[in-house]
Structure formats: structure tokens, C-alpha cells
Image (spheres, coloured by chain):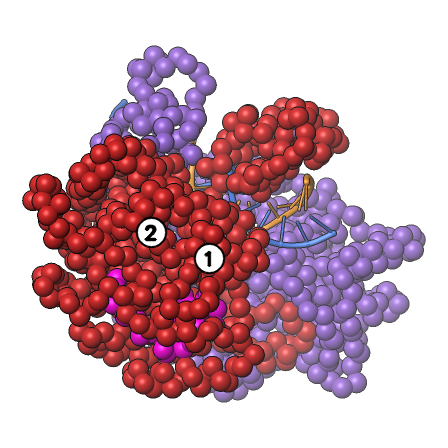
Chain colours: A purple, B red, C blue, D orange
Amino acid sequence: MYEDRTESFTQGKVCVVCGDRALSCNFGAITCESCKAFFRRHAHKEIYGQCDGSCPITVETRSYCRRCRLAKCFSVGMKKDLILSEEQKQRRRQKILENRSKRQSQEVFPPDSTSIQQDLTRVKTSNPPAPNTISPNSAASLDRVPGATTNWINPPLVSAPDALSTDASTVPKRDIWEIQNSPTDPDGIKRLAFETASAQIARLPDGMAKSRNVLDRGADMVTSTNPLEDSSSQSSSGGLSNQGLTLPVTICMPSSQISPTGHTAQADLQIQVPTGQYTSLTPGATTFTEEETIQQKKAKGKALKELNPREPSIDCNIIQALSEPCFFNLKPPSLESKAYHVLEPEIQQRLMLCVEAYREFCRPMVSIHEKVPQNYVSLLNSGEECYHQLVRFAKRLPEFRALSQEDQIALLKGNVIEIMIVRFSKCYNLETNAWTIPHCGTVQNVSGIIEEDNAMFSEFCIDDYSNFVRAALECCKGDDLILIVLQVITLFWPHISNLEDVASVRAAYTTYLDTLESYLNMKYLDSNMVIEVNKVMGQLRQVGKKAHDVMWKSQVSELHPLLKEMFDLR
Amino acid sequence: MYEDRTESFTQGKVCVVCGDRALSCNFGAITCESCKAFFRRHAHKEIYGQCDGSCPITVETRSYCRRCRLAKCFSVGMKKDLILSEEQKQRRRQKILENRSKRQSQEVFPPDSTSIQQDLTRVKTSNPPAPNTISPNSAASLDRVPGATTNWINPPLVSAPDALSTDASTVPKRDIWEIQNSPTDPDGIKRLAFETASAQIARLPDGMAKSRNVLDRGADMVTSTNPLEDSSSQSSSGGLSNQGLTLPVTICMPSSQISPTGHTAQADLQIQVPTGQYTSLTPGATTFTEEETIQQKKAKGKALKELNPREPSIDCNIIQALSEPCFFNLKPPSLESKAYHVLEPEIQQRLMLCVEAYREFCRPMVSIHEKVPQNYVSLLNSGEECYHQLVRFAKRLPEFRALSQEDQIALLKGNVIEIMIVRFSKCYNLETNAWTIPHCGTVQNVSGIIEEDNAMFSEFCIDDYSNFVRAALECCKGDDLILIVLQVITLFWPHISNLEDVASVRAAYTTYLDTLESYLNMKYLDSNMVIEVNKVMGQLRQVGKKAHDVMWKSQVSELHPLLKEMFDLR
DNA sequence: CATGGTTCAATACGTTCA
DNA sequence: TGAACGTATTGAACCATG
Ligand SMILES: [Zn+2]
Ligand SMILES: [Zn+2]
Ligand SMILES: [Zn+2]
Ligand SMILES: [Zn+2]
């Protein structure tokens, strides 16, 4: 509805349906943009209404009666045959995608690629998402993996013959893991992997929890890297322990600071959380009740904070940020978008499944209100919700549900670290080597902390982590869906020993690998994409192993009972 | 009522009714939220007040005088047509529900969890989301025309868009995902559409199926249209809850009263009804089998009745009356009378046609034996035969038979309420505001019942109905032929959207209007007669619209599947 | 350019609850 | 009654093809 009455400048074109300004002929009649959209949306639909069929249609009244508006559209000669059929639209989208990635692949080679930041900036400014552009030098630097597997079609350890290999199964199978873990013969690898797995099962106390909160926020920011989304999230940054993720667990603190109330309840906007009791698996363990309302907890948190003025308090902004829903989640592209219809239905379905499952990670965490975290350990302990989320995330996946409880637990325990690493990668600031927290003015650089305890972290070089993040972000630039599917794949990573039904796990692993591959092939004609992502997976395993090792060195005693259970720590 | 006077930040929008802050345009005028709600609640009501009609309406005073507030609402241009009708609201809710379950179909698990084990255990028990069931939209619209047409030569027609297109694309397209996930080729959609289209007719196994059988059968019978043949059906009448048809549906009742056996089988003298299963469109719906014999049903009904002694039972005489053939049918004058020879042969023929068709309404109903109706809902539900009769009635008319099956169904669905209103008007007692049932010493006054639920019937004032009946009966005093032809005319009332062959429907409508006019002009020299009947038709549409609304407000769950099908209720 | 589709923030309906 | 909310629809702006 245009105010300016200089209709002449639009060549006096007027919508024959409503009289609004018209720009062109649409579907057989000169119409305005709104009537054009209206007709496209409704021409094939049945419209129910209650009128005598003679409602006047003007600019003002056109939205009053859909039936009469549609009738008028037809009466002025608009033809629904001119609306592209679903199939035609599909072809069109396909073609657009092809052209787009063709164009981008040309852009990649030009000499200008400089720093990551510039890349990111370019992403922001250049309209079409340029996710697959990889700066040459970065790609090179990622190539730490000796003899990296370039073809992931054949998952590690998984020689699942009956897997749903949808296509190109002819490609020689190589196991990424073989490379990472350096074993040379398949059997050796397997065994090795298993050993590692069993060793791994126990880690990651709580670093996960807390750091996740913070990290999550970062993800929001990163998401805004998405050219389409832009602006709203300013790039301020509030750092927080992130390495927490990897291990700041080791920081000791007065036990008094670990409040017994330091756990959480689930409180989601949509989901009513039943109150209940936390019952530890181990009889003697502490029990927590979860009967407080969120409001009560908020109040309590405030009170606590006020009562302990001497304790260094964490910036309120951080707290607020942490408690917001989805504050750092990945933002996958909407699968509703017509563009994805090119994919086979099954692939679409799996992708949707991943995104749906991932939503479990997007719930707000309220635990942060309960007690203001004063340090990293309490931050960790207050993050129980993280693990619940992880469990729910896994449960969303039918393949996971189909497993025995033992296997489910084994997978969760065995792969949690890697999943979390992927999850938090999005908010890692490569420039500062810190996790960035949006909405907070501060950036907490953790490298110093890490360096404090060289003995503890000697095995976990910050470079490992940052290299992984760098590779991951550059690889998936802007396309959070890749990271999401990666988390699902990681969940099913079948390196764990003593799985009851290893075949099913492998099948699931393969299935989601294939899904990701299909997606990448569809979206990025650049076939290198699969290779790149494959490399990233290799790095993930490397860094995961190191994080795991460090975990075992940490002080167990201060962790929340649930976390101990999670990791079989005593 | 907002305190902050920074109205500018709301773009200076001000409620044109009360001056409060406004957010958007509501029902045709820029209003505040409260006036919007007020208008929605009261626009259809009559508000009586004892003021002089000049009360000022401001933010502070707006709730003082509802009458003046409503008047101001109208005066500033708010339109009650923009308030969704009951049907539209119902569809809207339906759509929201569908979308919601679609979205959450993957949302398998309850959100809360305490310990991992509990989480996992729950996983084991919880089932994957039920696949989304989609029920097809019916093609017919039940749109109402609010205003009465005063000139019946030009019926209030809805220019059905693209009426002549016979392709299946008129069927609303549904996303493939909604229905099944497996189709892999784009054609899937197309096929689906076709399925939907053909299903439109074929499926509906039941309700429709049922009526379809009848439709087809009806056609068979038409052969026997020969006037000589139908001696068997004397003009006694098989009444049935009629008003039930129009509205008492809304009365809620314990679900126990709705016996799953409370439906009927077709058992006509001439028509052998194939036994079969009722398969609802919606997978989860109840299934009814129709294999019992009438005797069995009778027994069952008795048993049921005895088992529920607390339920108020309807007088046995009524039952008997209902089961007698044609206990309350109209008795048209014999067209053999020489008096009618003045009329042109074609007119005579048409009149005879109407009378013959009407005889289909005069067959006895046996369903009443099955289960003694305890109240209006069960009465309604037991009245399946009514609809079969209606179908046969329509099938007798050549213009109707000439239509496509889709259009036939659309007409039946769209006009059934008005036809029934006319049909039952004859037994409405204007003195008592009750329907009188012959052969019974009792008169059942329903007004009390209707008034019981004011909320439900607020829009359907008993006065509306009685005014119509009064007008109709006074107008046609003694001449049942008028009412009969009126039913035929009503059948062809072409207000329905998306008729394939709207031209033919209009032609039929006009034809019978002309027939009636010729008859009236011949019989009643008083030329006012045409005008009077015209007025009655206008009232019929008004009362029909209200009845229609009430129908949509009713508890859908309690209705017989056939009725749901008939009215596209879910 | 002309004319299709796509997107997303604004809009406008009903619903809920205190 | 009216504020707050959930959602489907709308339409301006934009993107892509030929
Ligand atoms: Zn227009
Ligand atoms: Zn209209
Ligand atoms: Zn107002
Ligand atoms: Zn007043």
C-alpha cells in the first residue's frame, strides 16, 4: 500500500484487483505485489468465508474478505496455471543452488582471502551465504592430520555392510579414526579405540555444564555470522571459562562454595517441569530436591548474591545471558525452506530429526539463577541441566532409543566430551583464544588460566582446541546445520567397547554420516566440502582424546554427584 | 490502559473508540486491545441500556455504558463481518492443532528428567510420536450469506473462481510430509492430490460412503420416479428430531450416553443396505460396524435403556410415532386437480417433480428402534436416515443428478440445514414454541432446553426460529406445496463456494424459483404472495446462518461420524 | 526488465487468565 | 474486562532466471 500518489512514475499501473499501485503483470493480470502474493498463496486453496460474494475489493478492504478477493483475482483474468507447480519450483530451486555455489566456488580462488576475520566479514556483507568458501591457507593449516582421510563415506571401525549406503558406496572406505589414533591396522585401531573409549567414559565432570552456558551465548553471535541474519547481536563479548569445557575443573576452591543447592531444575517456556527429586544412582549420594519454582530460585539467587558481597560476583549480564533461552545455540537454516526439498525425503527427515533433537540443547537454563556461580567449579556444578539436555537430545533420535539402556549410557558417557566440544566451538573466539559471551561487555581470556597449571594442562595445548575450532568454523562457515549433524554423528561414534549392539550403533553412525554427506553434496557443489568436514571430524577426535585425558587428572571430589555418575567418577 | 504517555513510540496510534493506545487495526478500525475484545464479544449481541444513547466513551468511561460503546464501535467503522464465524474459528483451531502436532511430532519426550537412569528408562517406555494424520478437506463450503436476498431472481451468488475447471487441482494441496514421508519423487505430490480428490468421493468410507451408497442408490430409485409407483409410501410421516438438526446439538452430555452402537443401518423396504464398516477419515476415530440386524439393534436398544435407568427417557409414544411412516410430512394438494391445468405443462411437470422428490422424505425411519434417544444429541445421532432421505430426495431431481458428484456433495453439505429447517417448520407449534409430535399426547417444548445454555445459544435466539416459522406458516397457510418447492429451491441455493459447475446450479435454482413464482401467480392473484415468500426465504437464510454457527459451536466429539462428515467437522 | 519465487517482520485474529 | 500471548496471514523487499 503505497502512500505516494505519484502513480505516474510507476507508469500509472494500477492493480486491477484492488487498485493499489502495480508494478507488473502477475499471473495474467496487472496487480500489486500483495495481490500477487495473495493469489499465489490461495489460488489452489479452498477458501471458507461468509459473505454474499459481493464484497468490494479496494486497497483498504482487500484483506477483509478472502473469498471475494480470490474471486476477483480470477475474474480479472489471473490464471493459476501460471503458478509454478511444486515440481517446477523444485527444479528452479535446484538450479539456483547450482548457480550459487558455482559462483562461489569461483570466488574462493581469487587471491584476496586474508584473515579469518575478513572472511567472516565478507560473509556478513556478501549476501548469498558463502559457507563453503575456505581460505586456502587455513585449509592448509588444518592439515595437521597426517594422512587425513578424505572420504568419510566409510565410517571408522564401521564396516557396516548393511548400512544404508545410499549411493557412492563404491568409494574406498577409510577410517578417519585410524588416522587420528594412529593405529595402522584396522583391528589394532579398533582395539585401541575401545581402550580409549573405556578410559574415556569417565570424564568431564562439570566443566561441561557451566562453560556450556556461556559458550552457548557465543553461538548466537556466531550465528549472526550468517549473512541473512545480521546485526541484532552486537559483537560485544563476555568471556567465560570455556576451557572449563576442557578442564578447568582442576581449579580447587573452598568446599563451602559448593552449595548443596547448586543444582538445577528444568524450566522451559513451553514445557512444564514436574517437580521431583533427584535420586542418585548411588544410595549414599546426596539428594537434591527440585521443588522450588523458578521465581523462588531467582529470588534466592539474588538474595544469595546480596548476602555475600565480599565474594567476587560475576557480571550480572552474564547471569542474565545464561538464563535466557537459547542464548548461545546454533541456528540451523530453516529446513522448511523450499531449497531443501531437493533432498530425498528420507534425508530431509533425518536432517529435521537432528535439528529437532538439537532443540533440546536450546532450552533455557535456570540453574544459573539458583546460585550465582562464583568460580568455575561452581559454574560447572550448577550445570546439571546440561546433561539432562544431552540425554534428551539423544533420546530424540530413534536409533538411540532403539538401543538398550546399557548401550545408551555407554554412548553418552563415551562421546559426551566430543559432543560438547562441537557444541561449544561456535562461541570460541579465535582471535582472543577465549569463549565469547554475547551481551556482556567483558571477554574472559582463559588462556592465562590454562597456563597457570602447566602440569595439568601439559597435554592439552590450547592450540589443539583452537585449531579444531578454527577448522570447524571455517569449514562450516555459517552453516550451523553441519555442526548440529556433527553432534548427532558424534553421539553414535561407535568406538566404545562392550557395546551390546554395536551393529546398530554403527548403522546409525553410518546413516547420519550419509545424511550429512547428502546434505553437503546438495548444498555445496564444491565436493571438497565432504573432505573438509571429514578433516574436522578427525581433529575433533584428537582434541577429544586429549580433553579426556586431562579430565581424568582433575579433582573429582568437588563435582556434583550427577556428574560423577555420568562419568563413573568416585 | 497504558500509563505511559509516550504515545509517539506506538506511532501515535490511538483507539478511535476510546482514545487509549492502539496497536493495530481491529475489525476495520484502529482500536485498543480492550475495544477489540469488547467488539468481538458484543458485536453480535443486542445490548439494551437505559441511557439516552449519548454517553461519552473515553478510556475511563468506556466500561460504563456498553450500549454506547458498541454503538461507537460501529460508528467508527468496525465491521462485525470481520469477526470470524463459528465455522471459521473452528477451522482455525483445527489448523493450529494440526500445525502444532506437526511441529511436535518429533517431540517425543517429556522434558523433565532427574537422573540419567530415569531419563533413559523413560525413553524405553515412551513411544515415538504418532504419525501425523491428515484428514482431507472437503470441497464444499458452508458459507453463509448474511443478508437476505430480496430479489430472488438474482440469487446472491458467489462467483466461484474457476468454476469450470474440472481438473483435480482444485483440491487443496497438502504437503506431502503431512501425509506420508516416503514418496521420493516429485510426482508424489501430484499423485497425492489426485488421491485426495478421488478420495473426496471414494473414501469417506463411512459417513460419505454411507451417503454415497445412498447417492448411488438414490439414482437407482429415480427410475421409480414414476408417480404411479410409490404408493407404498403413504403420506404419513416419519419425524425425527428436527430441531435437533438445527441446533440442540450443542447440548452437552455425558459421553456415556453416546453409545457406540448409537448409529443406524439403512433398512429400507426397497433398499438393501450392504453391511460394512465405518472407517473414519481420521485413523484414531471410533469405528462402527453395521452388521447387526434391526432386531438385534432393537434388543440392544432396549437393553441399553434398561441399563441406564437414570437417564430421562423419552415417552414411548414418541418412539412409536417416530417409527411410523411419514408421521408429520407435508401434504401437498393433488396436482391432478384441473385447477393446475392452467399452468404451463413444464411448470406442472416441475411441481410434480418436487412432490415426487419430497416423497423420499416420507419413508418410515427405523433407526429410532435401535436406541431410544435420550436427548437431542442422541436423537441427532440416531437420525442418520434423515440424511439418507435427504440424499434420495435430491437424487430425484434431474438437475441435481446432472451435477458432478463433487457438486452434489457440496450442495447437500452446504444447504442441509436450511432444508431441514423448512422441513420441520410444519410441526412447530407457535403457541408453545415447541415442536409438536403427532400421535403422542405429549408436546415436547424445547425452548426450555435451548435456553438452558445461554452461552451456547446466545446467538441463536429462539425468536429467530419462531419468527421464521411464523412467517413461513402464515405466508403459505395451508399450502404445503410452497414449502415443498421451497425445499427444492433451497437445495440449489448457489451460495456455495467453489462449485465446479456453478452455472448449472444457478440455472436449477432459477428454474425452481420460476416454477414457484408461476404457481403462486396462478394460485394467488394477490401479487404480494411472491414478495411474501421472498421475505420468508430471506429469513430462512438468516436463521440458517445462526443455526450454522451454533452447529459449529457444538461439541463435535459427540456427533455421529456421519454428521461430522456431513458438516466437515473434526 | 519482466515476472516468477522467497523471506521476514508486521499485522490482526482468537485465546487465556487474573 | 483487558492485558498478554500464540499463531496464521499479509505484504514490502528482495532474489533469480530468461
Ligand atoms: Zn492489488
Ligand atoms: Zn466476500
Ligand atoms: Zn479503545
Ligand atoms: Zn450509553
Residue type, label 1: Ala
Q: Residue at x 14, y 48 (%)?
A: B350
Measuring from the top left, give residue A457's x and y in whole percent: 70, 65
Q: Residue at x 53, y 86 (%)?
A: A498
Label 1 Cα crowd, 10 Å radius (few <14 / some 14-19 / many 20+): some
Contact? badges 1 and 2 (CB < 8 Å):
no
Label 2 Cα crowd, 10 Å radius (few <14 / some 14-19 / many 20+): many
The quarter of the rendered structure image containing the N terminus of chain A is top left
Callout 2: SS: helix
Residue type, label 2: Val
In the rendered image, the vertical position of residue A279 relative to residue B37, given as above or below: below
Q: Which residue is mark 2?
A: B422
Q: Which residue is mark 1?
A: B434
Magenta stretch in the rendered image:
B361-382
Q: Quadrant of residue A296?
A: bottom right
Q: Chain of mark 1?
A: B
A30 or A48, nearer to the observer: A48
Task: Specify whether disc 1 shares its chain with disc 2.
Answer: yes
B104 or D14, nearer to the observer: B104
Measuring from the top left, give residue A570's x and y in whole percent: 74, 81
Q: Is B247 covered by the magenta stretch?
A: no
